[in-house]
Image (cartoon, rainbow, N blue to C red):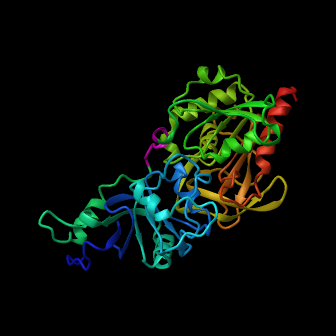
Amino acid sequence: MSQNANYSQDDAVLVLEDGQVYVGEPYGALGRTTGEIVFATGMTGYQETLTDPSYDRQIVVQTFPHIGDTGINQEDPESARIWVAGYVVRDPSPNVSNWRATGSLDDDLVAQGIVGISHIDTRKLVRHLRSAGVMRAGIYSGEALLDESGAPKTIDALLADVKTTPQMQGLSLYDEVSTNETYTIDPAGEFEGKEPLFTVAAVDLGIKAMTPHRMAERGCRVHVVPSTITFDELEDLHPDGVFFSNGPGDPEQADPEVELLRRVLDAGYPFFGICFGNQLLGRALGFGTYKLKFGHRGINQPVKDVTTGKVEVTAHNHGFAVDAPIGDPVPAPHEHGKYGKVFVSHIDLNDDVVEGLQCVDIPAFSVQYHPEAAAGPHDAAYLFDRFVDLMKSNKEGK
């Protein structure tokens, strides 16, 4: 590998752990950042992407070339901060044009210290990640590009820094993105100000703000609780149903949450899980999980609901998946079929990855994608109705 550095302090440099180098312009804050580099295919919704806690410790590449046209606003964030470790775009918009905008994306990235790079060939980069798989990477700009003598650092020095970054496989991250204190979302929309139809305990493993809002729109009072909650504390909320959210990291490193979920299932609470919650239901039932080569991230993934035969276009953000057999219901492997039968309810039509689980004998189901759909599409919103129906049936003793 060449030791020569064909860049200056005015540039930004992206280094992949396999040695590929991209030199572009700084975007957002100047400095250094490392993480797992992944790509997201959404043409819109960059603000929801940036504030999704599931992107904790990941550098996100936007495949759509032009980003930032609509600026940022105070209504679309999915959490209180930007979670991505770094940001890669081809052409940042020089102008902001939207009636809701309160500022520019660039300014927001600077304010929150998010190091980015622009004006590189993101198409080439994404094609490489699709063939080689996601990997560790680093973005360097400003003084982070210089050594102690003030000369540009060598590629070898930057690459050595990238390789000190922890691998995503084996990382437990849900505790660092979870809420510290319980908070409550009351019924909204047509149910605003009314007594809740149902109470949901939503375990925050990296929850997106739109998720409890979707339940509130259906008359639910949602208690969003920390990932550290005990089963006894959960029961004290007297929930009609329990929800496990999306979140970052390796589901194999979430044994405490799997044990909590098994207690929820043992107690007979209706259960709904999204994304990380789907992986944890898979583990609770006795299935394994595995890391995908480059994952699903975007808002245009075709998924088939095998219970209805319908195909829906869905929003995804996952790098891990459940290893369960597609086809007829099978006994859940945990403790010799203790939880009865289960089947794969949703399948990704691009690659046959498991996108949902449905229990036959207990009131539990989950999906791997994001039916709260911020920023769209809304094909899968019916899953929240399915959860409400499950709580209603359970309450009525059916």
Q: Residue at x 40, y 59 (%)?
A: 110
Nearer to us in this view, 19 or 323: 19
Whether residue 36 is visible to the viewer of this picture, yes or no, is: no
Q: At 31% from the left edge and 60% from the top edge, which residue is drawn?
A: 32
Assign the N terminus to one quadrant of the image: bottom left
Residue 327, picture quadrant = bottom right
Residue 192: image location, x then y, percent: 78, 36
Q: Position of residue 141 (x, y in %)?
A: 30, 67
Q: In percent of the image, x 33 and y 71: which residue is there?
A: 12
Q: Indicate the position of residue 176 as horizontal and vertical percent values.
A: 45, 40
Q: Nearer the viewer, residue 338 or 171?
A: 171
Which residues make up the magenta segment? 170-176
Residue extending furthest toward the left:
149
The verdict on residue 298 being magenta is no
Q: Judge left or right: residue 15 versus residue 255.
A: left
> From the image, which quarter does the C terminus lie in?
top right
Nearest the viewer among 337 and 268 is: 268
Q: Establish if 387 lies above or below 61.
A: above
Q: Residue at x 55, y 40 (%)?
A: 205
Is 42 rendered above or below residue 286? Answer: below
Residue 108 horizontal side relative to residue 386, left or right: left
> 89 left or right of 323?
left
Label count reads: 0
Residue 86 pos. (x, y %): 42, 60
Question: Does the rendering let one see residue 156?
Answer: yes
